[in-house]
Amino acid sequence: MRYDPAEFLARDDISRLQLSRLRTTCERAARSRLYARKFREHGVAPEDIKSLDDLRRLPFTTKQDLRESYPDGLNTVPADQMVRLHVSSGTTGTPTVVYHTASDVRWWSSLVARCMRMVGMTPADVFQNTTSYGLFTGGLGMHYGAELLGCMAIPMGAGNTQRQVKLIQDFKVTALHIIPSYALYLADYLARQGLDPRSLGLRIALVGAEPYSEETRRRLEDIFGFKAFNSYGLSEMNGPGVAFECREQNGMHLWEDAYLCEVIDPVTLEPARPGQVGELVLTTLCREGMPIVRYRTRDLTRVLPGPCPCGREHLRIDRITGRSDDLIIIKGVNIYPIQIEQVLMSLPEVGQNYLIELTREGHIDQIRVKAEVREEFFVEDMRALAALRERIAHRLRDEILVTPKVDLVEPNSLPKSEGKAVRVVDLRGKE
Ligand code: ADP
Ligand code: K
Ligand code: ZN
């Protein structure tokens, strides 16, 4: 693959590119039904974009806008110029559709390849994609990137862990794309088979598609002996390849030549203060078939201050705390599932799977955390288990400010989902 100089663009050049690409994006977008209407309603035209600050004159785009535009209200070119279509997995409701032209697929692949090279992958790596293919963008998105970089890519897809392991062993796989919950499951599976995860010889794992904590990253690196890099993307912005950690592992570089990034206060819709956590808002800068302007991702993060020692000047965003829809409110306290995950994964006695249940007892909301205990700690001694349960409840209380009920369960007893994990079950009003 030809070296992509955009990776090391200087700040001034990034801003210059962004302005000219934002203008082009608005001109294209105005040809779609959705933006023709939205721009008109907002009294704004592509010619009004004279500086990057003018971005704020443009309307936001919401998931609802995409749903209402189903199936092709955002398209700017006739269907015969499109070469690919993805439909979002619909984790949180009606699916939305994204079309790509040939140029869009090339751009997307080159962004993914850029991420892979940034973390140290080379054509000598053998890459296994353990996520589902099909409509989920983590499948083909990662696959095309790996091939463009020159890796041998194995399109294994999700599930069938026995086969995953056999392919990793037989073809000396060195790099994986894997969802965090599945990586934890794989660790358990290998333990049950009496296999040492480190003996697999994996070097690099690209880990993303759902929120996970620094504690989980450390646990995975410790178990497998690979370096795990956080990978962020969403179907509306192509898929993987939007933001990715470099080898410094201190936040994810967001490719600003391809995406314009804002972080807003989700209530006032004003820009968040520097360093403040808010909702990530993204504008595509290189997309031809279906540009999206100021898309409210509902993902919560902040822009990290200061330069990265790696020398790349593309801004860095923090680990995603969760989606605004993931927020749990119990007894008036705001809790994100990731806070609970972080505590559980920092405790060596706690195994690889957990579940959060929200219940209502009388008029009072309760939070119940079911955590698998690791085999060697799952002893018959009731007193030892009770003490562990107490300790977990205390640690969780310190983090989330409410005391949860804690159930300790046997290893591999909690449900395992293929694809993104379901971590929260809301039983309130359903009992
Ligand atoms: P769906 O919205 O149906 O889950 P997508 O595959 O488009 O379909 O999912 C994108 C979403 O996945 C993002 O908006 C974000 O909430 C989550 N996500 C992706 N990568 C990460 C990551 N590295 N950390 C946290 N969340 C992530
Ligand atoms: K190769
Ligand atoms: Zn860096």
Image: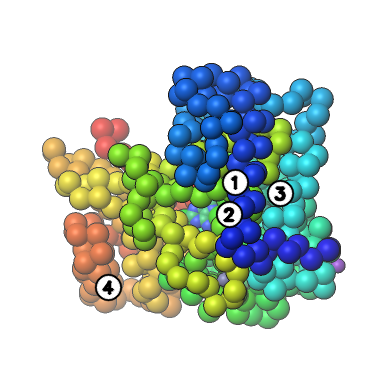
Residue 403 % position (x, y): 19, 59
Residue at 17 percent of width and 46 percent of height: 332
Q: Which residue is mark 3?
A: 108
Q: Which residue is mark 4?
A: 388
CA separation in Å, label 3 and label 4? 47 Å
Tell which circle, 3 or 4, labels the residue nearer the N-terminal end: 3
- The image quadrant where one finds the N terminus is bottom right
The answer to whether marks 3 and 4 mark residues whose Cβ atoms lie closer than 8 Å is no
Task: Tell me the amino acid under the disc marked 1.
Answer: Leu
Q: Nearer the viewer, mark 3 or mark 4?
A: 3
Task: Tell me the amino acid under the disc marked 4.
Answer: Leu
Residue 205 % position (x, y): 63, 68
Dot 4, how many residues are within 10 Å of its Cα: few (below 14), some (14-19), or many (20+)?
some
Tell which circle, 4 or 2, labels the residue nearer the N-terminal end: 2
- Quick one: SS at disc 2? helix
Horizontal placement of 34 versus 402: left or right? right
- The image quadrant where one finds the C terminus is top left
Judging depth in this view, the residue of 424 and 82 nearest the camera is 82
Question: In this rendering, does residue 87 appear at all?
Answer: no
Q: Is 330 rendered above or below residue 192?
A: above
Residue 50 % position (x, y): 55, 40
Q: Nearer the viewer, mark 1 or mark 3?
A: 1
CA separation in Å, label 1 and label 2? 6 Å
- Quick one: SS at disc 4? helix
- Which residue reaches farthest left? 363
Checking the image for residue 19, the label placed there is 1
Task: Tell me the amino acid under the disc marked 2.
Answer: Ser
Dot 2, how many residues are within 10 Å of its Cα: few (below 14), some (14-19), or many (20+)?
some
Question: In this rendering, does residue 131 appear at all?
Answer: yes
Horizontal placement of 250 versus 17: left or right? left
Quadrant containing ligand 3:
bottom right
